[in-house]
Amino acid sequence: MASKTMPSRGKVLGHALRSSSGLGLPGLLVPAWQTFAQRQFSTTTKRPSKLGRTPITIPPGVELSMGDLKIAKSKTSYKPTVKRRITVKGPLGKLELDVPEFVSLQQDLENKTVSLRVEDANVKQQNEMWGTSWSYLTNHVRGVSEGHTAILRLVGVGYRASVERRGAKERYPGQKFLCLKLGFTHPVEEGIPRGVTVTTPSPTRILLEGTDREAIMSFAGRVRMWRPPEPYKGKGVFINDQTIRLKQKKIK
């Protein structure tokens, strides 16, 4: 109880400094008083998102449209959130992106560009989601016009990959499975999600193609989890140009 009523050391030093207007603090107490002074770690002003301000070039054949406000359930909170849905249509398909309510879309038909705006760039959450929404929208525009790809490399003795059908395990009609031999006693089978095309140009190379980059990289991450690259022999599943630094063997 005594600790709650006693003033802190910083307040005591501050009171001593104010009371002695003509006298300064002893040299022994000056460093201690300076540690309690409030420090300004950054004096720069807040700037709007550099990515969010950059216009997005719209390729030929791609159309964007923004819907009205809607209430959506959040996966991380019990409170519902209000969002807008941006629909991106192109030669390769259609994708949808949900953005916060404070994000708006402005199109320039003459220059064939699209810009994202927020209500107040000085608000931390809006400034953060400005660049995030820009990045997702850029990936969607590129996905419906050119498509996304990812390459998985199997490094290891006996590692093989093939695309086959497993009728009893299909989650949707016509689903294919990526069958892997990664040194286990049994083959590994990963169901290919919708919108992702998987081919094997060689037994140790896997090519992933699709319009949704998030779906492609998520599937690649699930495959990589079976054999993450290990640092002693360099064996495992590598995504794109991923490399790993080898370590020396432990010699007792």
Image: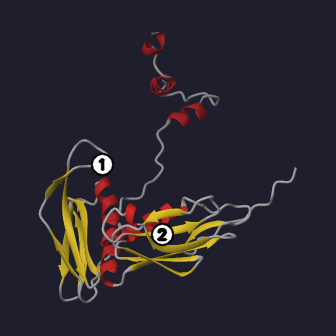
Q: In the depicted view, which residue is nearer to us: 41 or 157?
A: 157
* Image marks 1 and 2: residues in contact by CB distance under 8 Å: no
Among the 4 quarters of the image, the one containing residue 109: bottom left
Residue 93 in the image, given as x and y percentages of width and height: 26, 79
The kind of residue tagged 2 is Leu
Q: Residue furthest top?
A: 1
Tag of residue 94: none
Residue 187 in the image, given as x and y percentages of width and height: 56, 63
Residue 195 in the image, given as x and y percentages of width and height: 34, 73
Tell me how the rendering is colored: secondary structure
Q: Is residue 190 above or below residue 29?
A: below
The kind of residue tagged 1 is Lys
Residue in view at x 24 percent, y 83 percent: 62
Residue in view at x 56 percent, y 59 percent: 226
Q: Is residue 125 above or below residue 164?
A: above
> Does dot 2 land on a helix, a strand or a loop?
strand
Q: Is residue 250 visible?
A: yes
> Does dot 1 land on a helix, a strand or a loop?
loop
Q: CA distance from mark 1 to mark 2?
A: 29 Å
Q: Is residue 112 above or below residue 79?
A: below
| Residue occupied by mark 1 | 75
First in sequence, mark 1 or 2: give its number.
Answer: 1
Q: Is residue 48 visible?
A: no
In what quadrant of the picture does the N terminus appear?
Answer: top left
Among the 4 quarters of the image, the one containing residue 225: bottom right
Residue 55 in the image, given as x and y percentages of width and height: 29, 78
Residue in view at x 45 percent, y 27 percent: 18
Q: Residue furthest left?
A: 68
Tag of residue 178: 2
User: Counting other residues with Cα less than 10 Å from the Cα at mark 1, is it few (<14), some (14-19), or many (20 or more)?
Assistant: few
Discs 1/2, front: 2
